[in-house]
Amino acid sequence: MTLTFAFDAILALALVAVAAWTTAARDMFAAVAGSVAFGLLMALVWVRLAAPDVALTEAAIGSGVTGGLLIAVGARLRRNGASPGAEPPGAILRCTAAVVCGLVTVGLGAIVLLSPEPAPTLAPLAARHLPQTGLGNPVTAVLMAYRAIDTLLEVVVLLLALVGVWSLAPDRYWGGRPGMQQHEDPNGVLAFFARLLPPIGIIVAIHLFWVGSVAPGGEFQSATVVGAMWLLAMIAGLVDLPPIDRPGVRLGLVVGPVVFIVIGLAGTALAGAFLAYPPGHAKLLILVIEIPVTLSIAATLGLLVVGPPQRMPPG
Amino acid sequence: MSAATVFGLCAAALVGLGLFGVLVDPHPLRKIVAFNLLGGGVFLIFGITARRGAAAGFASDPVPQALVITGIVVAFAATALAAALVLRLVDETGRVTLRSAGSGGGPSNDAHS
């Protein structure tokens, strides 16, 4: 008890310390690096809160993909040599902001300390209907059955974010390839790892995908691993990203949401509600949805990280 | 003090720190980083709600957990869009700032000088 409490307290202090350092660091790049460390510590906290599914997502997306994106953006800002921006605001404004933020923290802390006992929970409801979904992992059941509409909208939000990112491309690059052409040494260490890791990564991704129905894992974690393997091969110069107006790219991006919506509409006819599954077929239908959704999420995550097209379209 | 309480207080501190960074830091990329700290704090509050709602044989209520997974993915999408906006802004203006070129000595500076 005391040992686990000590661990929790140290972990919480480390998390707050990294966050404070990220906020206070003078160097922009140091702040970005701090945010990667923050994500990894957060993943540990999720394990301590008995939420391994969230821990996997946090480590993969919150720390890994977000960190990679922010480091790439930070490096590009530094390379561009853009002149530094505005001065920080003056002392009065900063003090006011500090007081306001302090009050928010105190208020939230009070809510945490004064929250009701026993805490409200939906766990018994989730447990009661779990056998009908055919799934063993309650978090996957919430994501794919009870609250499938949230997951559908989330996949659509990812796609809309990509549309937003692409629409920031200068006109002359529209229809071109995203990211810069990579010229890595084909016999170098990076290219070696980019050949070695993807087969392992794909097996890990398939494992995460498959165990997601009964154990921690699932399509988001799996998709992130696939997307990361794709980015690795791209950074090493082994594959180039396709031009964004290629039909195959568009198809890969929308196939997940489209299958999701079609099965949802079929549920209206067969089971009486949008995204309802006919009794006895829930697990099969969830699997049919998850496979294309995983591919679409992997493609969307990878393309979100590399950003808008930066090269002239071919021809 | 239980793990949920410890990390709940930690979450409250993270929200405060992140909010401070979003309000005060003039660098747009660092505002994005601060926004993610703020989001991390909010997700943690969901996390302790889930942990405190342990019942029916689950160590943690699965509903808030699923909401947080959705939230992490959406936060990433928002981060990617915001980062692309910052890069485009810098390409257009050559300056890493959200303040428009004309207002360098404008009223926003006078207000706190």
Image (cartoon, grey):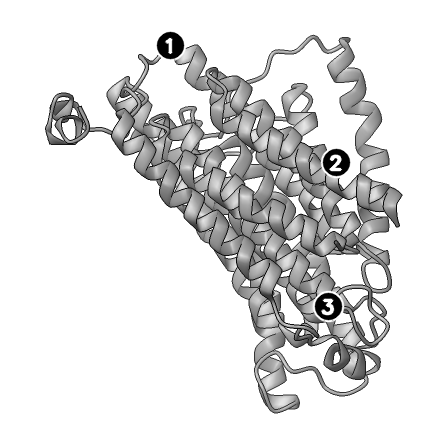
**Dot 1: within a 10 Å radius of its alpha carbon, few (fewer than 14), some, or many (20 or more) residues?**
few
Residue situated in front as seen by the camera: B64 or A255: B64
In the figure, A68 relative to A75: above or below? Answer: below
At x 61% / y 78%, what residue is drawn?
A: A275
Type of amino acid under label 2 = Ile
Residue A109, image x, y percentages: 55, 53
Q: Which of pointers 1 and 2 lies earlier in the amino acid sequence?
A: 2
Q: Which mark is residue A81?
A: 1
At x 64% / y 26%, what residue is drawn?
A: A234
Type of amino acid under label 1 = Gly
Snapshot quadrant of residue A200: top right
Residue situated in front as seen by the camera: A73 or A231: A73
Q: Which mark is residue B61?
A: 3
Snapshot quadrant of residue A78: top left
At x 54% / y 38%, what residue is drawn?
A: A303
Q: Are marks 2 and 3 on the same chain?
A: no
In the figure, A113 relative to A74: above or below? Answer: below
Q: CA distance from mark 3 to mark 1?
A: 48 Å
Q: Are marks 1 and 2 on the same chain?
A: yes
Type of amino acid under label 3 = Asp
Q: Which mark is residue A10?
A: 2
Element marked by disc 1: loop
Going by the image, does B52 lie left or right of B17? Answer: right
Going by the image, does A98 lie left or right of B55? Answer: left
Snapshot quadrant of residue A182: top right
